[in-house]
Amino acid sequence: MTDVQTLSEETLDRKLVRGLALVVGLAALADWLFYGHRLGLSLVIFIVALEAGALVANPIRAERRRMLEAAAVFIAALAPLVEALTPLALLIAIAGAAYFALVVTPWISESLPSRMIAALWLVVAGPFQVLADLPGAWGSLRRGGGTTLVTNAVSVWVVPVAFGAIFVGLFAAANPLIETWFAQLALRDSMARLDAARVLFWVAMLAIAWPFVCLNRRFREEAQHLLQQVEFETTTTPGLTRLFGQAAILRSLILFNLLFAAQTAMDINYLWGGAALPHGVSYAEYAHRGAYPLIVTALLAAAFVIAAMRPGSGAERSRATRVLVFMWVGQNVMLVISSMLRLDLYVATYSLTYWRAAAFVWMLLVAIGLVLIVVRIVSDRSDAWLIGANLVALVLALYVCAFINFPHVIASYNVAHSFEVSGQGQPLDLDYLLSLGPDALAAIDQYGAQRTSLPYVLQGPRARLAAAHLDAMQDWRAWSFRGWRLKRYLEEYARGAA
């Protein structure tokens, strides 16, 4: 074996040992922060530590501007998690950490869509990377015999650890303070709690930490390949050329515009104009039956436009076709707005829920996507640009939603529009109100204030929700800005009620 090969293998061994140590250390930190404790600020600390591990274990070659951009994205991604622990906030924080790690380490593309897709792909597929890397890691550990860096690294610590343990034991026997500190560590209790659930927890944490510490090019390359494949398929597929010829597209757009114009006219008449509906059909039924199917219609229309108006195709260059496409997209935007109005009418009658709130956001994203299609056609952009623009719109929408206290919004809306408070609509669904958790407490108190007193059926659950939240806030690991604000409100409400 040559000196260069030996040096290369030792470098790989050194990198592997350092990576394994970081991964195990991060898993131990996760155990201390999470296991047996409520989640909150502890997740922010762990994600920051995860990012630090990625920076220590991987070379940093990004230029200063790109580093600052990635750092800004990472800090912004952590903000929703500091505000409140929600699944959406956690997803944004992890995606932001993945984006930062991939950008500051060696990068192969300047494309924003490819960076975003690579970060999302790291979040989804990253935990499974350890399965693919295990054979290579095991081979590296077995290589070289007793003089490898791995063996040396272990052997040089045998004497210090052994004698250090002896000295610590003697000090503990001589000093009652040290003995008390060891008793407080409760190592025996910790070993007793080493059950199957904890082992699985460690396995999960190791799998999550591994792809950040042992970053590879696969996520970047697959993201770039995906975008290149989109460009190739949308510009060279013969089947699309035959099915979406210029004559077929022109006739389709004329027909579609007429059909959509009829639907839009009916909505203008009944929803916007307030015309009387046929006997037996209520506005709530008319609104509910049309809200979701019309969104599916708009999505199909968007897919048709993307397939028909391929960059460089004859249809895209035709002035008449472009005018008809713009008209049709405009009608689709009106269709989405109509769907939002339908849903608003239905919610006003039957109350607000998580899914109905999500439907509003989804409809808004569909409308933005339709407008972006027009921008793509007018500015002669590629389909990869369209994908990136829609990804940016999606990320911004989710980011804003991560700061919205949806349980509080839903509870406040349902209380304000309930039959007991407004004299219209449906009676308040108390079970659903309580299922929204502690964030609904302010709305519950408002409900009691409107009725001069809180109903008996809500008094017990309200007290339990408040007590549970105040108890959770006693652990610093569970702290969040939203939880802290609610804690202040509960304390002030209790003083006012006293």
Image: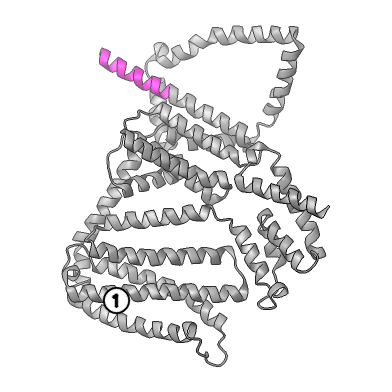
Residue at figure coordinates x 24%, y 57% from the top left:
382
Q: Is residue 366 left or right of residue 459?
A: left
Which amino acid does the dot numbered 1 rest on?
Met
- The secondary element bearing badge 1 is classed as helix
The overriding secondary structure of the stretch rendered in magenta is: helix
Q: Position of residue 134 (x, y in %)?
A: 42, 31
Q: Is residue 449 left or right of residue 82?
A: right
Whether residue 165 is in magenta: the answer is no
Q: Is residue 36 visible?
A: no
Residue at figure coordinates x 35%, y 29% from the top left:
60
Most distant residue in the bottom direction:
279
Residue at figure coordinates x 28%, y 47% from the top left:
225
Most distant residue in the front direction:
496
Q: Is residue 133 left or right of residue 470?
A: left
In this rendered view, identify the residue nearer to me: 229 or 321.
321
Part of the protein shown in magenta: 3-17
Quarter placement of the N terminus: top left
Residue at figure coordinates x 37%, y 16% from the top left:
144
Whether residue 10 is in magenta: the answer is yes
Q: Report the residue marked by disc 1.
A: 327
Q: Position of residue 275 (x, y in %)?
A: 50, 89
